[in-house]
């Protein structure tokens, strides 16, 4: 094992290079965006602006989306097209709106608006997606950390809390290739979600299936379909599912959807009509023309995987080479998604992020994958390997490992 002075001289050598590296946000790289170039010309100049059912997509209409795009999302999620509403460019926006309407109008007949309760709480499996937690914080909703393991959230704890505490109105979930751990909920976890018996009748699960088709390896994870399971227990109204093509076509310029039970779809459409006359059907049409079936979409995802896989692999290679000797250091090796989660000894993550920043490497702030930005153990760093090139990643990963060694060695001497 290296001494602190050896590590510091290595660190200073990195620092003197004037590096400018970024492993912080889960964005597709430019070559991934190039895979969707067909979208730019999908609606030809000959005025072919009609969907399969003859709808002129240049005009108002079809609040729930083009039938062919509903079918595409339905096939992606394993539900019926009638259970899909196609939205605008962002699933996060749909989540925000569903939550916002729950605050102002409640989630079902006879349920009071969440904002009328003195206190409401959300369960937040951790580490999780920072923007989910930002939404709940924005609405002043109290957040409760739920630990996760390789199978998903701690279901014993979730079952206990929701059965006892009526202030708990919701739970965030990223059930497949979770952000940032990359884990997929086991069948048992999905089944236990499906049969939850919450004390609050207006409890809802926000099932954000952002990475449902984002497999990286030839041994992809499988996720049990939540609505079929929930139906067995009469619980299908308890789930709102979300997805988008942000990491299939264009990030922030794709198409998003919400999947829900028949009665929730009806209710959401009843609210949506006050928000918009209709979403961008021209963009929906472009997507429908590029992806004529789920098989076309899966082929696109294989092309993404071929570009991304070497990036994940170079990070694993460097971590394996430089971090294996450290106790309490481990990292996830997901079969898909956009992230690797680096687990460090307690009270070192912030220091590692600071050291990295001073040497020219931006990583996601320590604490970001936790509610209120607070990691109680200060021990998790989210790695986003998709955007930089393989060469940049190799340098970034080596520098990060040097920072990890620095922080651990420094801590052991204090
Ligand atoms: C879990 C998760 N949900 C949602 C999003 C954002 O999706 P959209 O671009 O559809 O708003 C992301 C983006 O990183 C994500 O990781």
Image (cartoon, rainbow, N blue to C red):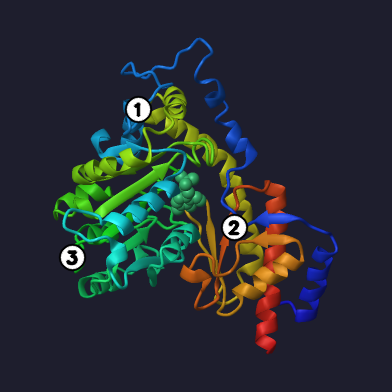
> Percent position (x, y) of residue 339?
53, 55
List the single residue furthest toward the right. 16
Q: Quadrant of residue 407?
A: bottom right
Along the viewing direction, whichever of 54 and 97 lies nearer the viewer: 97
Q: Is residue 78 left or right of residue 328?
A: left
Task: Tell us which disc is closer to us: 3 or 1.
Answer: 1
In the picture of the structure, the residue carrying the numbered disc 1 is 66
Q: Earlier in the sequence, mark 2 or mark 3?
A: 3
- How far separated are the C-alphas under marks 2 and 3? 41 Å
Task: Tell us which disc is closer to us: 1 or 2.
Answer: 1
In the picture of the structure, the residue carrying the numbered disc 2 is 316
Task: Identify which residue is drawn at 32% across, 28% down.
Answer: 62
Task: Identify which residue is drawn at 39% across, 66% down.
Answer: 124
Q: Is residue 337 visible?
A: no
List the single residue furthest toward the bottom. 414
Q: Earlier in the sequence, mark 3 or mark 1?
A: 1
> Percent position (x, y) of residue 120?
32, 69
Q: Residues within 10 Å of mark 1 (few under 14, many from 20)?
A: many
- How far separated are the C-alphas under marks 1 and 2? 42 Å
Q: Residues within 10 Å of mark 2 (few under 14, many from 20)?
A: some
Along the viewing direction, whichever of 144 and 313 lies nearer the viewer: 144
- How far separated are the C-alphas under marks 3 and 1? 36 Å
Q: Secondary structure at mark 1?
A: loop
In the picture of the structure, the residue carrying the numbered disc 3 is 197
Q: Is residue 347 visible?
A: yes
């Amino acid at each position: 094992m290296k001494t602190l002075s050896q590590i510091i001289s290595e660190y200073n050598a990195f620092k003197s290079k004037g590096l400018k590296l970024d492993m912080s946000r889960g964005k597709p790289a430019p070559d991934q965006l190039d895979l969707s170039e067909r979208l730019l010309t999908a609606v030809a100049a000959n005025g072919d602006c009609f969907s399969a059912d003859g709808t002129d997509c240049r005009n108002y209409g079809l609040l729930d989306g083009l039938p062919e795009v509903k079918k595409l999302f339905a096939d992606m999620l394993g539900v019926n097209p009638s259970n899909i509403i196609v939205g605008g460019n962002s699933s996060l926006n749909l989540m925000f709106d569903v939550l916002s309407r729950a605050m102002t109008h409640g989630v079902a007949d006879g349920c009071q608006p969440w904002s009328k309760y003195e206190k409401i709480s959300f369960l937040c499996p951790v580490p999780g997606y920072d923007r989910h937690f930002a939404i709940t914080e924005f609405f002043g909703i109290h957040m409760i950390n739920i630990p996760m393991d390789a199978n998903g959230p701690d279901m014993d704890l979730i079952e206990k809390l929701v059965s006892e505490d009526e202030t708990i109105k919701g739970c965030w979930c990223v059930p497949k290739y979770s952000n940032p751990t990359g884990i997929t909920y086991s069948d048992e976890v999905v089944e236990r979600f499906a049969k939850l018996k919450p004390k609050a009748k207006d409890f809802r699960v926000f099932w954000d299936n952002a990475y449902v088709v984002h497999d990286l390896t030839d041994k992809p994870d499988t996720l049990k379909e939540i609505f079929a399971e929930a139906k067995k227990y009469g619980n299908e109204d308890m789930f709102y599912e979300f997805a988008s093509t942000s990491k299939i076509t264009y990030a922030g310029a794709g198409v998003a959807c919400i999947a829900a039970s028949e009665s929730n779809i009806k209710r959401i459409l009843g609210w949506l009509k006050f928000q918009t006359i209709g979403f961008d059907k021209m963009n929906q049409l472009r997507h429908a023309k590029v992806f004529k079936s789920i098989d076309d979409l899966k082929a696109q995802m294989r092309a993404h995987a071929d570009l991304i896989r070497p990036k994940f692999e170079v990070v694993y290679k460097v971590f394996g080479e430089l971090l294996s000797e450290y106790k309490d250091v481990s990292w996830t090796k997901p079969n898909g998604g956009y992230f690797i989660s680096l687990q460090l000894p307690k009270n070192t993550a912030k220091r590692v992020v600071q050291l990295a920043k001073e040497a020219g490497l931006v990583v996601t702030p320590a604490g970001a994958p936790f509610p209120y930005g607070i990691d109680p153990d200060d021990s998790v760093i989210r790695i986003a390997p998709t955007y930089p090139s393989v060469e940049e990643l190799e340098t970034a990963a080596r520098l990060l490992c040097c920072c990890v060694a620095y922080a651990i060695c420094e801590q052991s001497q204090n």
